[in-house]
Image (cartoon, grey):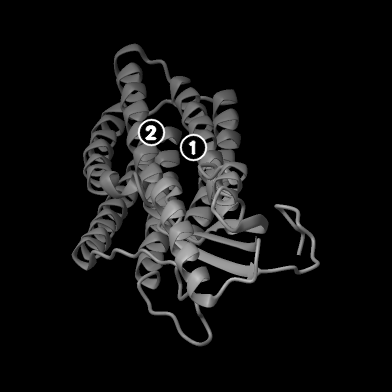
Amino acid sequence: MGHSHSHNHSHDELKGRNLFISILLNIIITAAQVAGGLISGSLALLSDALHNFSDVISLVISYIANKLAKKKASLYRTFGYKRAEILAAFINAVTLIVVAILLIFEAIERFKNPQEIESNLVIWLSLLGIVANGISVLLLKRDSETNMNMRSAYLHLFTDMMASVAVLIGGLLMKFHQIYWIDSVLTFVIALYLIWVGFDLLKASTKVLMLFTPDTIPVNEIVERINEFEMIKNVHHVHVWQLNEEEIHFEAHIDFEKDITLSEFDKIRSEVEALLFHDFEINHVNIQPEFGKDDVKDVIVQD
């Protein structure tokens, strides 16, 4: 079985610290926006506060998952908690969509019955949200590009920042033009955006949890390339799955042309592992050698 690991503990600690800072910032924003929304009567501000509260929960989930993912494997958990961050991403995606649906219903109800809103408070609190969420977005941006859990947290914060921008625009329009229905319209637009980004993340995390073949892995091409090796007759019973953001696993049965020795198999196995790692970024390989075995030779076999 082939492995390629790289761990950067100082970077992991920085990632955890950035998440913790983002949690504190969002608690402050949430408390301020709830108070401000109740005082001003702004639904957009309250909806933004609700979204921020969901962010606090999501960030806490991401933070716990980040800590769990570092725990060592054991006899009862042979993979450790490596999937904790994928599970966190799935939960966060679901919360994004649920919150968005609730906001749509609230926006429709408020649109039917628009209310006068204290725009000055809305403007100042939306500015607070933009600054605080902007800092959090910058803290998590780097890791969001390579880690699904961090991407889920980043998306929550980025949509929050954009929501605060929309609330600011609404506050300015209410202050200078008395267009109070814009509060509901902006809430509706924010909710639709949340559904869009949430569904994309939900789909990606579901694929990993369901052990689907990663989109970047061309199974037929891999089989053809392995079949080109000398002494290999057939590659079948292939499984490819993604354990987490860093590990892609490949397992297969390989028929050999003749009854080779163990040392000959080790040499071919090493060459196959090198091919899969360098050309397809597969870093965990498990091969079952066979000779003259009467079994199903299909590439994909339903276990």
**For the residues marked 2 and 1, what is the alpha-carbon distance in whole angstroms?**
13 Å
Residue under label 1: 197
* Whole-percent x, y for residue 130 in the image: 26, 36
According to the picture, the residue beneath numbered tag 2 turns out to be 163
Name the image quarter holding residue 119: top left
**Label 1 crowd (10 A; few <14 / some 14-19 / many >=20):** some
Name which residue lies at 48% across and 75% down: 263
Front-most of residues 259 and 266: 259
For the C terminus, the image quarter is bottom right
Point 34% across, 65% down: residue: 5
Q: Residue furthest top?
A: 177
> Of marks 2 and 1, which one's residue comes earlier in the chain?
2
Residue 41 image offset from top left, x and y in percent: 41, 35
Q: Position of residue 200 (x, y in %)?
A: 53, 39
Kindly identify the amino acid type of the residue bearing the numbered disc 1.
Val
| Count of labels in the image | 2
Residue found at the very far bottom of the displayed protein: 75
Q: Quadrant of residue 241?
A: bottom right
